[in-house]
Image: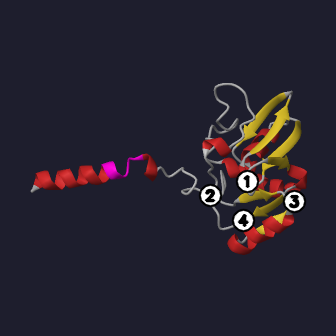
Amino acid sequence: MFKIFTTVVVALLMLGCGPEKNPHVKSGMFQSVSENEATLVQEGPDKRYCDRCGMDLVKFYKTSHSATVDGEKHQYCSIHCLEDHLGDGVTVKNPQVVDVESLKFIDVNKAYYVVGSKKRGTMSRVSKYAFANEEMARKFQEKYGGEIMDFTNALERAKEDFR
């Protein structure tokens, strides 16, 4: 009897180990995309990982931000990690965010952020997703809730993560 029980337990564990059960595939996490959909702007062997926290940028792509600091491109898994870098007193140039719809980087100052939706956040309990146009932000808001705001206000909300 014990042998049958052990065999069943091992079989069940093995069923959950295949790639189709990976919790980070696009269908498993809203923030995730497939590797070929992600744009990675950093150079070097660690270009796939957040400059601040080390999280996988493909898995957390839809909340990804980027900026140039001292001539070097940095990519962050979230506005939270961008704010963490800004907290070091650095000056960033060309800050950008991924548009949830097109998956392309856009200027943060032209983005419409939906803050506090039902979709899980990255590095924060309060989600912050960006859109290139207000209409798409409103559609997302209607479906998942949250408040639409500009980058400055979304950044202020991200600062609250550190209090």
User: Does 28 sit above or below residue 45?
Assistant: below
Give residue 69's position: percent from left, percent from top: 84, 32
Expressed as whole percent of the image width and height from the top left, the position of residue 141 reads: 75, 70
Dot 2, how many residues are within 10 Å of its Cα: few (below 14), some (14-19), or many (20+)?
some
> Which numbered disc flags the more N-terminal residue, 1 or 2?
2
Which residue was labeled with disc 1? Answer: 163
Q: Which element is circle 1 on?
A: loop
Which residue is more in the foreground, 106 or 77?
106
- Distance in Å between CA atoms under marks 4 and 2: 14 Å
Quick one: SS at disc 4?
loop
Q: Decide if residue 67 is in sight here.
A: yes
Q: Nearer the viewer, mark 3 or mark 2?
A: 2
Judge by depth and name the residue closer to the eye, 146 or 111. 111
Q: Answer above or below: position of 104 versus 143.
A: above
The quadrant the N terminus occupies is bottom left
Q: Which residue is mark 2?
A: 30
Category of crowding for the residue at label 4, using alpha-carbon neighbours closer than 10 angstroms: few (below 14), some (14–19), many (at least 20): many
Sequence-first tag of 3 and 1: 3
**Label 3 belongs to which residue?**
150
User: Whole-percent x and y of residue 155?
Assistant: 82, 53
Residue at 86% in and 50% down: 108
Which of 43/121 is in front? 43
Amino acid carrying mark 4 in the image: Gly
For marks 1 and 4, give the CA distance.
17 Å
- Residue underneath mark 4: 116
Give the structural element (helix, strand or loop) at label 2: loop
Q: Are marks 3 and 1 in contact (CB under 8 Å)?
A: no
Going from N to C along the chain, the mark reached first, 3 or 2, is 2
Q: Amino acid at mark 1?
A: Arg
Alpha carbon distance from label 3 to label 4: 13 Å
The answer to which quarter of the image holds residue 115 is bottom right
Nearest to viewer (mark 3 / mark 1): 3
